[in-house]
Image (cartoon, rainbow, N blue to C red):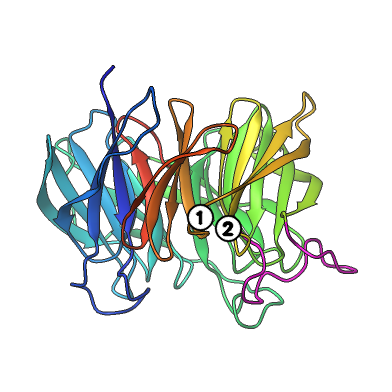
């Protein structure tokens, strides 16, 4: 059976915001779908802070967010084992951290100022213009350090056809209507408890599952596809979180405390990356959509920023000090390869959301 190609986005090894040129770029790793063994990673192209990457469904063009103050998105033509630069365009804000392809549009969530950028794409995948449509948002939360303003962290397509932006700064999931001219604000799809700091979400079986980075939680929202509105029905503390009165899951801002990151569905289980405790946490998804904690699976380096389920293996981008790791569903570490400041895993022909 042929190997699966994985594209790995990275941060500058010295940390977010440091000067480029110290090893960051887009890497490639091959996964053996039978054994779960990963090949030695190699850097395909050097580009600054490509913390999130997506690829066109036809596999011809790959896009990378440049998570810097300047806020850029880079496009690359895919040539087997080579990436050809096709140019850059503004992400519409500062520090873009997530991208979503939607036909001839590319959405960019800009963490720095909370703006959502809408980039138009030509038929060949190149950018139509340097400047995107920019949708600004207002609001704040109770955490003075992290919620002084909006911080868009994730973009998703909802079952009802709307575009959703998860805002860590305002404790909201913002909703946008797709129009021929771009996107139009359509209110708030869901509001989380104050101080949640929503980060990522995944939709499935009539529910949305969402991580709270600031209060160390996992939330379940019953989803109405007719209106694309979510209602909170369950909140669980992230593994390792010390429950305190009035604070579900404790305070993730303390160094070493749990800070949930990405989450993905693996059949009837939800897999959540938990930084601080350095593990993947698995939850069983019941018929009614509610979660039950099943197991915590330790990781070699302990900073799971992003992961993807590929051919039954969970492949994790471990940011600090940097590795890409493949685990069996049982939690057994099958393979782990050093890779500087790994930030995102994109399976060839897959979806890294």
Magenta segment: 240-260
Identity of the residue drawn at 30% across and 79% down = 18
Q: In the figure, 226 relative to 218: above or below?
A: above
User: Which residue is the site of mark 1?
Assistant: 304
Counting the numbered discs, the total is 2
Q: Position of residue 6 (x, y in %)?
A: 30, 39
Dominant secondary structure, magenta: loop
Identity of the residue drawn at 80% across and 27% down = 288
User: Which residue is the site of mark 2?
Assistant: 278
Dot 2 surroundings within 10 Å: few (below 14), some, or many (20 or more)? many
Q: CA distance from mark 2 to mark 1?
A: 7 Å
Q: Residue furthest right?
A: 245
Please tell me which residue lies in front, 242 or 291: 242
Callout 1: SS: strand
Q: In the figure, 126 relative to 305: above or below?
A: above
Callout 2: SS: loop
Q: In the figure, 79 relative to 219: above or below?
A: above
Q: Position of residue 29 (x, y in %)?
A: 27, 42
To which quarter of the image does residue 145 belong?
bottom right
Specify whether residue 34 is painted magenta: no
Mark number displayed over residue 13: none
To which quarter of the image does residue 240 belong?
bottom right
Residue 8 in sight in this render = yes
Badge 2 or badge 1: first in the primary sequence? 2
Identity of the residue drawn at 27% across and 39% down = 39
Please tell me which residue lies in front, 317 or 82: 317
- The N terminus appears in which quarter of the rendering? top left
Residue 99 in sight in this render = no
Q: Position of residue 206 (x, y in %)?
A: 68, 29
Specify whether residue 254 is painted magenta: yes
Q: Position of residue 17 (x, y in %)?
A: 34, 77
Q: Do labels 2 and 1 touch, CB within 8 Å? A: yes
């Amino acid at each position: 059976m042929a190997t699966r190609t994985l594209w790995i986005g990275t941060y500058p090894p010295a940390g977010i915001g440091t000067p480029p040129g110290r090893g960051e770029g887009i890497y490639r790793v091959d996964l053996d779908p039978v054994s779960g063994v990963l090949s030695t990673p190699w850097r395909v192209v050097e580009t600054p802070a490509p913390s999130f990457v997506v690829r066109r469904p036809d596999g011809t063009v790959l896009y990378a967010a440049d998570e810097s103050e300047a806020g850029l998105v880079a496009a690359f033509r895919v040539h087997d084992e080579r990436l050809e630069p096709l140019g850059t365009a503004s992400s519409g804000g500062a520090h873009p951290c997530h991208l979503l392809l939607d036909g001839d549009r590319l959405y960019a969530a800009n963490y720095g100022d909370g703006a959502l950028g809408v980039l138009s794409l030509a038929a060949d995948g190149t950018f139509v213009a340097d400047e995107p449509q920019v949708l600004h948002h207002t609001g704040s939360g109770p955490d003075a350090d992290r919620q002084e303003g909006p911080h868009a962290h994730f973009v998703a397509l909802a079952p009802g056809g709307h575009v959703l932006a998860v805002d860590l700064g305002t404790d909201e999931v913002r909703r946008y209507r797709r129009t021929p001219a771009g996107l139009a604000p359509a209110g708030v799809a869901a509001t989380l408890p104050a101080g949640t700091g929503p980060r990522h979400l995944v939709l499935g079986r009539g529910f949305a599952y969402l991580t709270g980075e600031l209060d160390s939680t996992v939330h379940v929202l019953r989803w109405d596809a007719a209106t694309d509105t979510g209602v909170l029905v369950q909140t669980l503390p992230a593994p390792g979180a010390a429950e305190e009165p009035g604070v579900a899951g404790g305070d993730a801002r303390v160094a070493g405390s749990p800070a949930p990151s990405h989450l993905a569905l693996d059949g009837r289980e939800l897999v959540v990356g938990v930084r601080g405790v350095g593990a993947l946490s698995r939850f069983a998804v019941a018929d009614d959509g509610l979660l039950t904690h099943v197991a915590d699976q330790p990781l070699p380096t302990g900073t799971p920023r992003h992961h993807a389920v590929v051919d039954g293996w969970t492949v994790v981008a471990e940011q600090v000090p940097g590795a890409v790791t493949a685990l069996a569903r049982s939690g057994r570490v099958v393979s782990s390869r050093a890779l500087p400041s790994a930030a995102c895993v994109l399976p060839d022909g897959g979806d890294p959301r």
